[in-house]
Image (spheres, grey):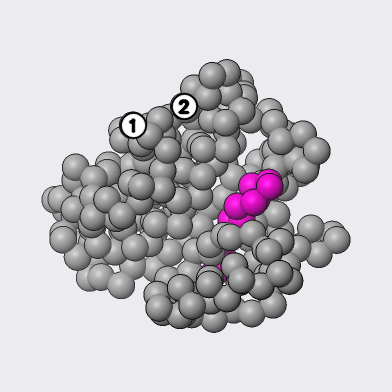
């Protein structure tokens, strides 16, 4: 994928790869002088399904959709991010990273198929993106007891990208705060490790990749 001059993302190659193929591709890119400017990132597809959103890590942090930029860190002043989403705020609104009080992920009630990523500042709450996901499990009636083991697995799989994107935004914002004071990341109870064993398993794989000061902030949740 590349970003055009009008900041529109353009897909160059869209394909599903196995873990072993990803490792081979990564080694090829690292060894290639022509590809050293490429920044790593991740899109929200599961398996071979179409993707809706993605993020890029590099000199600046960017979240994008299939046809627009959602959030882009300023190239010259990395304390600023520009919001290009249509989440109820002016297109092109700029936010100081140091003014972000917390980042949150929210889910709709069972079957939890509507995901929201947002930020709160001292004066406002902004929705950056809303995404619809399909759960491949037999749905229980709304409010019908605790989530089943199968539901918890699907929740983990289908929220992995949005939680990662939120955590990356927390990390970027934390680097721009006084003494790197960590900001909270709020996620729903069904995405918490103490309720969801699949999330606990995933978190154990992430642990070495997340700075220590951010790990505690990921244990917060939205009541």
Q: Quadrant of the N terminus?
A: bottom right
Say which mark, if any, is on residue 182: 2
Q: Which residue appears at 39% of the width and 56% of the height?
A: 159
Disc 1 residue crowd, few under 14, some 14–19, many 20+, Cα 10 Å: few
* Up-down relation of residue 133 to residue 79 (above or below): below
- x%, y% of residue 29? 61, 71
Q: Nearer the viewer, residue 165 or 140?
A: 165
Q: Residue at x 49, y 64 (%)?
A: 44
Q: Position of residue 57 (x, y in %)?
A: 60, 52
Q: Which residue: 54% across, 81% down?
A: 15
**Residue 57 is a magenta residue:** yes
Q: Which image quadrant is residue 169 in?
A: top right
Can you see residue 55? yes
Is residue 139 or residue 205 the one in the foreground? 205
Query: What mark, if any, has residue 216 been given in the picture?
Result: 1
Q: Is residue 171 shown left or right of residue 112? A: right
Left or right: 97, with 18 as reference point:
right
Quadrant containing the C terminus is: top left
Question: How much space separates mark 2 and mark 1, taking CA atoms?
Answer: 9 Å
Against 116, residue 175 (above or below) is above
- State the image coordinates of residue 69 (x, y, percent, origin top left): 70, 54
Q: How many marks?
A: 2
Q: Is residue 3 above or below residue 119?
A: below
First in residue order: circle 2 vs circle 1: 2
Tell me, yes or no, whether the two marked residues, 2 and 1, touch with CB atoms within 8 Å: yes
SS assignment at label 2: loop
Highlighted range, magenta: 50-63
Check residue 30 for magenta coloring.
Answer: no
């Amino acid at each position: 994928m590349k970003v055009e001059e009008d900041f529109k993302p353009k897909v160059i190659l869209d394909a599903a790869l196995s873990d072993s193929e990803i490792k081979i591709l990564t080694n090829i890119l690292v060894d290639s002088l022509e590809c050293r400017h490429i920044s790593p990132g991740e899109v929200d597809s599961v398996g071979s399904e179409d993707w809706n959103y993605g993020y890029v890590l590099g000199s600046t942090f960017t979240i994008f959709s299939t046809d627009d930029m959602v959030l882009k860190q300023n190239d010259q002043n990395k304390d600023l991010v520009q919001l290009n989403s249509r989440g109820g705020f002016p297109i092109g609104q700029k936010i100081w990273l140091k003014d972000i009080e917390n980042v949150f992920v929210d889910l709709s009630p069972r079957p939890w198929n509507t995901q929201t990523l947002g930020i709160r500042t001292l004066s406002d709450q902004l929705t950056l993106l809303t995404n619809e996901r399909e759960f491949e499990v037999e749905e229980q009636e709304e409010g019908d007891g605790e989530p089943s083991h199968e539901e918890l697995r699907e929740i983990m799989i289908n929220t992995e990208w949005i939680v990662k994107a939120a955590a990356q935004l927390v990390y970027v914002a934390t680097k721009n705060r006084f003494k790197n004071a960590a900001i909270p990341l709020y996620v729903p109870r069904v995405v918490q490790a103490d309720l969801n064993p699949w999330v606990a398993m995933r978190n154990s794989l992430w642990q070495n990749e997340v700075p220590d000061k951010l790990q505690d902030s990921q244990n917060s949740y939205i009541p």
